[in-house]
Image (spheres, rainbow, N blue to C red):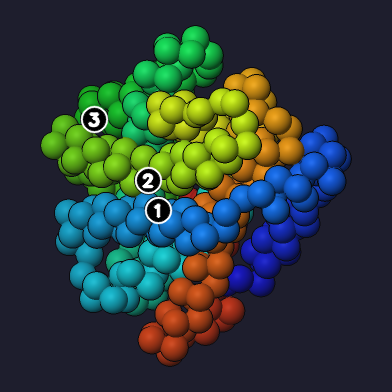
Amino acid sequence: MFSKYKKKILLSVAFGALIFLVFSIYADFDKLLKAFGEFNWAYFPLVLLLSFGNYIIRFYKWEYYRKMLDIKLETKTSFLIFMSTFVMSVTPGKMGELLKSYLVKEEVGTPISKSAPIILAERLTDFISVVLLCLAGAFVFNYGKGIVIGVGLFFLIGVVIISSRKISMRLIGLMEKSKHFGKVSEKIHMAYESIYKLIRPKPLIIATVVSAIAWFLECLGLYVVLKVYSGFTHIDVSLLSAVFIYGFSTLVGSIAMLPGGLGATEASLTGLLVLLNIPKGISVASTFIIRVATLWFAVLLGIIAVYFYQKHSNKDLESLETTDEPLNNLK
């Protein structure tokens, strides 16, 4: 399973190191080191705890969806599967999250076409919640309104289309005329029935609110970092500013479809902090601290979870075979 992803993950790590080098040059390496030295690292565990809170809340969203689709799993197994997915956080577009569906199939035989729509529903509600979080800031600071509103409308239109059986059945009908899609017609219908259940008004609202709370915790993590640095700058960053900066940068990184949003997210975070007249050294240091506490911390937890999942399930994930072909993956 991991053999084909290891290279991609290692390339992402190398790309992350390159980004660190580029931003270090931009900030002046000596000033960046000074900024790291000025940070009170006693607050770093709090930032990690806020990130972990994000993961726990999102796990309960996964559980909510899983139970809606009547997928039988022990809570412990479900948690290990959910956390194991984080090892794939640096895959393009987070497509590695399909690992959840593969592992669920291995555990209880649930077809991937039934469980994979949970991942789509998770991403839909994540995007909508992040848009809601940074919407106020976009208008208050008069920055990025087009991107925020555009992303929000795109995903809302997607929800409307999926919610309409009439429109969705027409689209599926057109797909079935293709020889490529026609072979898995039954699986496409199963996948649609799953996603249709998950984005009905009530579960959509519940999941979006839960997502907003989860992502707010990571926004709060950035706020903590900036407050620690506030004694070294004349700018006292507000919570609204921190929420907007983190939320907007997360959107930019996600729509860029780069592994873990690498490059795009860092550039957005640093750029917006510099616009607030925060010195480059502190802006870049803050960016790296929050990215380590969110992206790379998640990858580390994923590695640990994979180890414990393999011990718990007596499965070797190296032997789990998958294919890059999306249609075959529906089986």
Instruction: For residue 174, say whether it is visible.
Output: no
At 28% from the left and 76% from the top, the residue drawn is 76
Q: Are marks 2 and 3 in contact (CB under 8 Å)?
A: no
Quote the CA–CA distance across marks 1 and 3.
33 Å
**Is disc 2 placed on a helix, strand or loop?**
helix
Q: Amino acid at mark 3?
A: Ser
| Residue at disc 1, secondary structure | helix
Q: Position of residue 149 (x, y in %)?
A: 43, 16
Left or right: where does residue 174 sit relative to residue 61?
Answer: right
Q: Which mark is residue 163?
A: 3
Q: Residue at x 43, y 80 (%)?
A: 309
Q: Earlier in the sequence, mark 2 or mark 3?
A: 3
> Which of these two is toward me, 44 or 150?
44
Q: Is residue 213 left or right of residue 24?
A: left
* Amino acid type at image mark 1: Leu
| Nearer to me, 4 or 45 | 45
Question: Label 2 sits on what residue type?
Answer: Leu
- Numbered tag placed on residue 217 in the rendering: 2
Rounded to the nearest whole Å, what is the CA distance between mark 2 and mark 3? 30 Å
For the N terminus, give its image quadrant. Answer: bottom right
Q: Residues within 10 Å of mark 2 (few under 14, many from 20)?
A: many
Dot 3: element: helix
Circles 1, 2 touching at the beta carbon (< 8 Å):
yes
- Residue bearing mark 1: 50
In the image: residue 215, left or right of residue 225: left
Residues tagged 1 and 3 counted as in contact (Cβ below 8 A): no
